[in-house]
């Protein structure tokens, strides 16, 4: 199928599935957000990101709204350097929301988990660290 036919079909597909679904369709590979040790003092917090997709399937521009600069830098790096986008989505903007929370019983061992809620929400949950007394 030629590219001239594929692009209108892709645009019709986006209209049929709704723009909220574009976020899932246009992201072809993404590393899941993690709780890096350097982020512990920045949690809880949030990052709302908008990524304009370039012609090569890479991020052309990333706009970040974050509760903390370190959280913003981490998610921006993830979306710019460790995420690939569909070349058919060139020029479109996708949105990703990442929330970092602390919940559960305190533990001596740092642990975290990530929840995904379609189409574009990630929640990184870490347990509080118990200190030696």
Image (cartoon, rainbow, N blue to C red):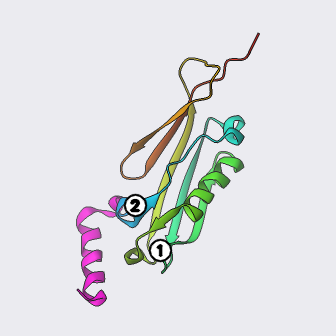
Task: Choose mark 1 or mark 2, whichever is in front.
Answer: 1
Which quadrant holds the C terminus?
top right
Between residue 45 and residue 111, name the one nearer to us: 111
Looking at the image, residue 34 lies above or below residue 95: above
Relative height, residue 7 to residue 131 (above, below): below
Locate residue 105: give its quadrant: top right
Badge 1 element: loop
In the rendered image, residue 51, in percent from the top left (x then y), is placed at 52, 65
The circle on residue 57 is 1
Magenta region, mostly helix, strand or loop? Answer: helix
Looking at the image, is 43 positioned above or below residue 88? above
- Residue at the (62%, 28%) spot, across then down: 110
State which tag comes first along the sequence, 1 or 2.
2
Specify whether residue 71 is painted magenta: no
Using the image, determine if residue 81 lies above or below residue 122.
below
Quarter holding the N terminus is bottom left
Q: Which residues are magenta?
A: 1-21
* Residue lying farthest to the top in this orientation: 133
Q: Which mark is residue 23?
A: 2
């Amino acid at each position: 199928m030629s590219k001239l036919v594929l692009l209108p079909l892709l645009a019709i597909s986006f209209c049929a599935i709704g723009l909220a679904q574009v976020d899932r369709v246009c992201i072809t590979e993404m590393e899941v957000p993690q709780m890096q040790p350097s982020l512990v003092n920045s949690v809880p917090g949030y990052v709302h990101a908008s990524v304009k997709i370039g012609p090569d399937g890479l991020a052309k521009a990333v706009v970040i709204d974050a509760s903390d600069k370190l959280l913003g830098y981490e998610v921006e790096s993830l979306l710019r350097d460790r995420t690939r986008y569909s070349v058919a989505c060139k020029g479109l903007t996708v949105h990703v929301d990442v929330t970092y929370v602390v919940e559960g019983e305190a533990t001596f061992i740092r642990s975290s988990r990530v929840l995904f809620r379609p189409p574009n929400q990630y929640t990184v949950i870490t347990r509080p660290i118990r200190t030696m007394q």
